[in-house]
Image: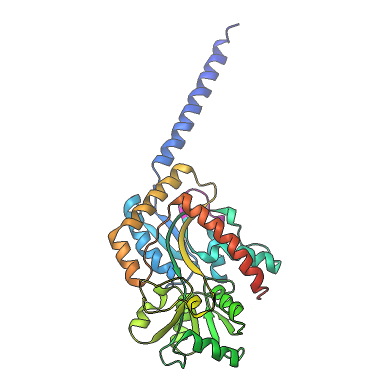
Amino acid sequence: MPHPPSRRLLLAHLAAAALLGSAGTALAQSAYPARPVTMIVPFPPGGLADIVARPVAEAMGRELGQPVVIENKAGAGGGIGMAQAAKAPADGYTVLLSLSSFTVIPEADALLGRPPMYSLAALRPVARFTADPTVLAVRADAPWKTAKDFVEDAKKRPGAINYGSSGNYGTMHVPMEILAQNTGIRMTHVPFTGAGPAVVALLGGQIDAVSSGPATVLQHVKSGKLRVLGHWGSGKLKSMPEVPALKDAGYGAEYAQWSGLFVPAGTPEPVVQRLRAAARAAAADPKVKEVIANAGSPILYQDTPEFERYVQADARRMADVVKKIGKVE
């Protein structure tokens, strides 16, 4: 039986509204971004995350046609800024430039029995920019000339040597704990809000050592203020080819500090693809490559699928490391 005219008119209006709605959604996504994008950096200026974020944000902004504005949100080893990003609207207007403590903090929360600041599932990996072994840096006037000197002195004076970090279970704390586990030494941990403040404290004599990304200390090594005793990787570092690997000294300590871009889970796929393309273009930009390489951390780019697998594998490794570190309040 034919529909009455009024019902046919209603159905026609509903169909038209549905078409307009889907077209509007597509238009909104294709028009992304229509305003500036905020890039949360969960550490203060001066550390690796900030060093990578600034040239990357500028290059991504050129590619997107809108500014990418950095917001440094430090605290809790990066956890405060990461949590803020995880809770942000999934619309592509808030992104996160994180370090490898991203995979550690949820494990630490679970170990300590405290409410999680965020879950790994709340943030989606988009692109990795760098992945460097951390380096063991001391002042140039320190008595240790080699990693062996450092370890042997720490064995003789348990707890006397103190080191700074970006916070409990952060990217500067974990490698030092790995070294301590592998050598049987005990050091005193002094947490700061980020790598920048920790290095300032090292330069000022308030602490004795740090484990940080090469980019954070390279300028001070070149100026003769700091000395690097070893690194947590394999082979030679491009920025410091003269520095030996700790595992070559028989200590078996390995750790990589990586930096990568994330978005809140549920961000529309067309928006993720725009950000993915912008990140890829930034990583390939000669100016970005030069700035980050000069800082001591060459680009080691991973696109979304590869980076997702990398993060999953890193999370499994760090779960074991955190369990071995145990509770640190």
- x then y, percent, for residue 144: 47, 90
How many labels were placed on the picture? 0
Residue that appears at 53% across and 57% down: 311
Residue 77 seen from this side: yes
- x then y, percent, for residue 277: 38, 49
Residue that appears at 37% across and 79% down: 242
Residue 104 horizontal side relative to residue 49, left or right: right
Dominant SS type (magenta): loop
Q: Is residue 212 above or below residue 84?
A: below
Asked whether 235 or 257 is in front, the reply is 235
Q: Quadrant of the N terminus?
A: top right
Residue that appears at 53% across and 51% down: 89
Residue 234 appears in which quarter of the rendering? bottom left
Residue 6 horizontal side relative to residue 239, left or right: right
Asked whether 272 or 214 is in front, the reply is 214
Residue 240 horizontal side relative to residue 313, left or right: left
Q: Is residue 202 above or below residue 280?
A: below
Say whether residue 26 is magenta.
Answer: no
- x then y, percent, for residue 92: 46, 50
Asked whether 45 or 12 is in front, the reply is 45
Q: Quadrant of the C terminus?
A: bottom right
Residue 207 seen from this side: no
The part of the chain drawn in magenta is 86-94
Q: Furthest residue to the top? A: 1
Q: Furthest residue to the left? A: 286
Residue 310 horizontal side relative to residue 59, left or right: right
Q: Furthest residue to the right? A: 113
- Colour style of the rendered protein structure: rainbow
- x then y, percent, for residue 294: 32, 71
